[in-house]
Image (cartoon, grey):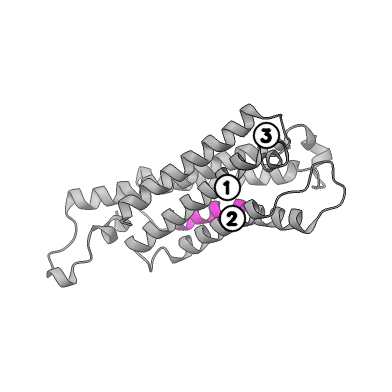
């Protein structure tokens, strides 16, 4: 897989995930959280597709970053792999029914895996953009990272298990906030991928690489990171 193919894989995986979850949202009976759709008739398949497609998008992006600059993007790749693993674990271990008063082992694994995903992705975006130039593409990555993190903070404050939920009537809208967190993370992943490919195009168009023998040339995959 080339870096360009990894970018397309990231975008395609994210769009497939969004479409699958949108189908569950529109076609199935309303549920408090997105993962609850897996517990209703006809909901398991779209939820699994949504989670696994987004995990594939994270893996594609991590692969593209590794091909471009394995040293400078190491932290970002680790976080993307953690996010992909969390999504796969969330798909394997279903959540507990919303009416259940006792958390099962599967439900606890699902919750903590989701926590890893929601935490890892904003940090991955921030580490990727950290230290970059103030170009619009990197500013967009920074902005989406902050947006995702802030949305997650509000969601956690509104969640019924939070001590702040009764103070802000979190039960009324914590489901909408969870969907906002998922949407923000999806947009963040695509913005990261687009920043990646835009940087590569800039490096190739400007020819910033110094002239070196063929055996020593780093190639355009490395040049975009300095842009």
Per the image, the residue denoted by label 2 is 88
Quarter of the view holding residue 181:
top right
Q: CA distance from mark 3 to mark 1?
A: 18 Å
SS of the residue at dot 3? helix
Give coordinates of residue 212: x percent, y percent.
Answer: 13, 68
Which residues make up the magenta segment? 116-127
Of residue 26 and residue 178, the one placed in the foreground of this image is 26
- Counting the numbered discs, the total is 3
Horizontal side of 2 relative to 107 (left or right) equals left
Most extreme residue toward the front is: 41
- The numbered mark at residue 176 is 3
Q: Are marks 2 and 1 in contact (CB under 8 Å)?
A: yes
Q: CA distance from mark 2 to mark 1?
A: 7 Å
SS of the residue at dot 1? helix
Estimate how packed mark 3 is, as few (under 14), some (14 to 19) or many (20 or more) residues with alpha carbons within 10 Å: few
Per the image, the residue denoted by label 1 is 51
Q: CA distance from mark 2 to mark 3?
A: 23 Å
Give coordinates of residue 65: x percent, y percent.
Answer: 38, 59
The tag earlier along the polypeptide, 2 or 3, is 2
Estimate how packed mark 2 is, as few (under 14), some (14 to 19) or many (20 or more) residues with alpha carbons within 10 Å: many
Of residue 11 and residue 133, the one placed in the foreground of this image is 11
Horizontal side of 33 relative to 56 (left or right) equals right
The tag earlier along the polypeptide, 2 or 1, is 1
């Amino acid at each position: 897989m080339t870096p360009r193919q990894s970018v397309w894989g990231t975008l395609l995986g994210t769009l497939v995930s969004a479409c699958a979850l949108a189908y569950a949202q529109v076609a199935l009976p309303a549920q408090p959280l997105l993962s609850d759709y897996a517990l209703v008739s006809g909901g398991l398949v779209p939820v699994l597709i949504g989670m696994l497609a987004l995990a594939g998008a994270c893996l594609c992006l991590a692969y593209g970053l590794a091909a471009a600059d394995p040293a400078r993007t190491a932290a970002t790749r680790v976080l993307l792999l953690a996010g992909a693993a969390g999504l796969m674990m969330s798909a394997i271990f279903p959540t507990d029914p919303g009416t259940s008063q006792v958390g099962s082992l599967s439900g606890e694994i699902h919750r903590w895996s989701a926590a890893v995903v929601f935490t890892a992705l904003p940090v991955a975006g921030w580490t990727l953009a950290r230290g970059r130039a103030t170009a619009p593409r990197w500013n967009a990555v920074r902005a989406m990272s902050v947006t995702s993190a802030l949305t997650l903070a509000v969601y956690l404050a509104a969640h019924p298990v939070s001590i702040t939920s009764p103070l802000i009537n979190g039960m009324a809208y914590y489901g909408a906030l969870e969907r906002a967190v998922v949407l923000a993370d999806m947009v963040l992943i695509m913005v990261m991928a687009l920043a990646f490919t835009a940087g590569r195009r800039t490096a190739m168009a400007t020819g910033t690489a110094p002239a070196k023998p063929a055996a020593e040339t780093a190639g355009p995959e490395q040049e975009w990171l300095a842009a």
